[in-house]
Image (cartoon, coloured by chain):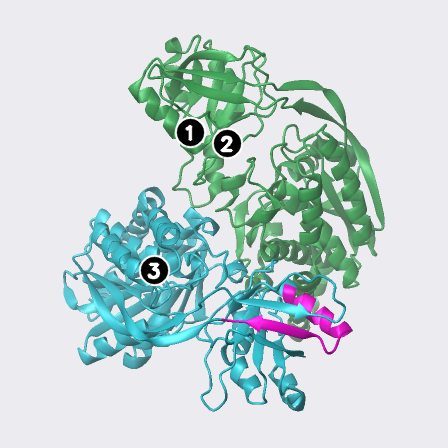
Chain colours: A green, B cyan
Amino acid sequence: MRRYILPVLLTCSLPALAQQKEDDSLAFRRIANEILTNSMAYANLKVLTTEIGGRLAGSPGMVKAEKWGEKALQEAGADTVYLQECMVPHWVRGAKEEARIISRRRDFIPPLAVLALGNSVGSGPAGITAPVIEIASFDDLEAKKDQVKGKIVFYNYHFKPTFIHTFESYGDAVKYRGRGASAAAKYGATAVIVRSMSHGANNFPHTGAMSYDEAYPKIPAIAIGLEDADLLSRRLQDEKDLKVYLRTNAKMLPDTIGHNVIAELKGSEHPEQIITVGGHLDSWDVNEGAHDDGTGCVQAIEILRTFKALGIRPKHTLRIVLFANEENGTRGGKKYAEVAKAKNEQHIFVLESDAGGFTPRGFAFTMPVEKRAKIQSWAPLFRPYDVTDFTGEGGGVDVGQIAEAMGIPMGELLPDSQRYFDLHHAANDVFSAVNKRELELGAFSMAGLLYLVDQYGL
Amino acid sequence: MRRYILPVLLTCSLPALAQQKEDDSLAFRRIANEILTNSMAYANLKVLTTEIGGRLAGSPGMVKAEKWGEKALQEAGADTVYLQECMVPHWVRGAKEEARIISRRRDFIPPLAVLALGNSVGSGPAGITAPVIEIASFDDLEAKKDQVKGKIVFYNYHFKPTFIHTFESYGDAVKYRGRGASAAAKYGATAVIVRSMSHGANNFPHTGAMSYDEAYPKIPAIAIGLEDADLLSRRLQDEKDLKVYLRTNAKMLPDTIGHNVIAELKGSEHPEQIITVGGHLDSWDVNEGAHDDGTGCVQAIEILRTFKALGIRPKHTLRIVLFANEENGTRGGKKYAEVAKAKNEQHIFVLESDAGGFTPRGFAFTMPVEKRAKIQSWAPLFRPYDVTDFTGEGGGVDVGQIAEAMGIPMGELLPDSQRYFDLHHAANDVFSAVNKRELELGAFSMAGLLYLVDQYGL
């Protein structure tokens, strides 16, 4: 289609163009009505989150979630559903972690609420007891590098409240979680404590992936909640030689087998040309993985269900992918890219939803300007649905793999970001934190975009 | 200012105009940073909702809330704070209502979750037991008017999911709550049951104001949750002569004294010209009145605090009003209009926040086109904050009184509307349902708009 749509548009009369716009507008209305009235997204999410729950790579939840995904995609009406095998890391948290402030004042201090960071090593059964040094930033660490040896480094870098889009705050702060342990181990630290990547008004610790630089000793790494981080900081002001005891029981087991769960609606005109949409099926082990990323999975499935329910047979092949192991390895996204490249598949667009099931505000894209301009020309169709932002750069970790490997245009749904980091990677990312309509409007936005990409190409 | 800003703008050079835009943009950034970093809105809301809670007109909560409002406004830095007395209705719910399905099948059916509608009469201590007739709409009522006598009318009108803006669904459905009782009493009904005005995925009943047509007998009126409404409808399909027992204990007492709580920052150039911003201090008795409308109150207070904190002395007098009795009488809004008119006050703009403390999407206005065009010319300043919708018509129930009485331009904050009717007038409208940043971004949006209205007039 994309090969001849432009000449057609250029030669068609203005009334025909107006008719086409009206048809698209009516198609949008039909898609929205179908999803807002008959969506299965919320019911599907309920099963995935409350019956299966946490589903980290390698866990029993992963296996159950893969089975659930196959079944949900079949029920949504896929032509074919299949599993794409990939090796995934197998990190386990082990018994519950703990950490306590040990003060000379001997007053009662409740235990810190902690979560070991994903991929981190355990402390050993005896735990670690050491003085704590508070570090404000990596620059601060360099300045204090001679004081770090034998201590627990406490990165108390604050999630900045003044960014309007919270993912910018995350991008700004997450390096302390990701590579803080090795940066501290370089100077002899025994463990690290990281202030959670959040500005939630609560004390939930937020886990998330970290990685070690093999050049330095692997030391335990935990996140603590914001209230505890403030408490620890205050106590350190008063008592410079304050100690913390911490014990973590995590370990990395050998890689194991996981799967991307893939479904297709075969294209009626260009079955060899593929449009991919997906979210990731894995989640952290400490919650139900609702907004991260159960919502992305059920939205992708909902697009398929809606096209089938409305009798929309795509011209290009629509592929739904529930990616494995986004959280601590991206092995699913990498495998998907690797196989597509090996088979020399033709992909025209890849789209992801992995920023929460909140009210959609727009999309971010990484693609050449003329393709973006084409999408932006569709903006008026989205306006009645309050989906208005088509300006940002972005894509998503999973679809980013194939986009980069093969030079495919990519996009991601941009939901309202204000609530995401209240619950991201924390125990409160649960089904009850998802609003049915917000979830559905996100599914509609993606369905509408894919409808247009399928109709007119990119 | 508004009298000579236009000539100044027309004669100023382009570089000066660019400078002014940059200054406004910097002012916006300062306001946003101040609110996102140091806001008192969330802390204030916590006290109002969790320490005072429900505060219906005439209740002890109303009196506590007025005292709280005075104190919070003083602490925010008002030049003056005063109470404006008004008589308010005094409706009391009495002991907890109840309703049960009485089936010939004699199987166990849990009691219906019910709330008497605000302003409704009680059933008397014996309650009412009667057959139920399900009514789909007022047209359906007319068609079945001969079957209504002696029965309980069950309005099972569904909140439409296909409107994108949920206030349109509300506007479509709320007439059954508002005047359904008298419409049914006209044909001899003994009571009415209303399907709640919500599409929340739960069973909370939603109360709200109703009124009687004095021409017909006053009959009890209750709301039931959506799951119970579906249950009752299903049971009626199977068992046409199904009965319901209901008992409500509500009554209307004589009017009592309430107050608008008003604070001012005196204008430095035009103290006689007034800009009003507010929310309503009352709430229903069954919840904490968080989104309705604690958030509007604390946002209005936050604007005052922010102007003081940043040393922004308005040119016009900024008046913060916490209105009395919006929910079941609008007496506060009416009194404010009446006094302003009697004193022949000069008002240049009135703004309200009463649609929840969710992420702001824009503003709705009721004003002449040239004033709206002026506001729309400011839209680029709001764009970095994702506040983009300035097209809708609207105002708000409280500021609508003075706007109509005196022909004042009015506006209202438009927060994202998807979650509002999950909790509106129901037991789950509580502090924990409010997100701190969403609340703050709403306060920022209003502060920014009022900053511009103050700088450049309308």
Q: Nearer the viewer, mark 1 or mark 3?
A: 3
Q: Residue furthest front?
A: B126
Q: Position of residue B9 (x, y in %)?
A: 25, 64
Residue visible at 36% across and 14% down in the picture = A144
Q: Position of residue B382 (x, y in %)?
A: 39, 56
Q: Which residues are magenta?
A: B228-248
Residue B433, placed above or below residue B205: above
Res. B395 image quadrant:
bottom left
Q: Are marks 3 and 2 in contact (CB under 8 Å)?
A: no
Q: Are marks 2 and 1 in contact (CB under 8 Å)?
A: yes
Residue A86, placed above or below residue B181: above
Q: Position of residue A146 (x, y in %)?
A: 38, 9
The kind of residue tagged 2 is Pro
What residue is disc 2 on? Answer: A205
Residue A324 vs residue B226, the one in the foreground: B226
Which quadrant is home to the C terminus of chain B?
bottom left
| C-alpha gap between disc 3 and disc 2 | 36 Å
Q: Chain of mark 2?
A: A
Which quadrant is home to the N terminus of chain B?
bottom left
The kind of residue tagged 3 is Gly
Q: Which mark is residue B323?
A: none
Helix, strand or loop at mark 1: helix
Residue B425 vs residue A156, the one in the foreground: B425
The kind of residue tagged 1 is Asp
| C-alpha gap between disc 2 and disc 1 | 9 Å
User: Is A117 displayed left or right of A334 in the figure?
Assistant: left
| C-alpha gap between disc 1 and disc 3 | 34 Å
Helix, strand or loop at mark 3: helix
Helix, strand or loop at mark 2: loop
What residue is disc 1 on? Answer: A228
Q: Chain of mark 1?
A: A
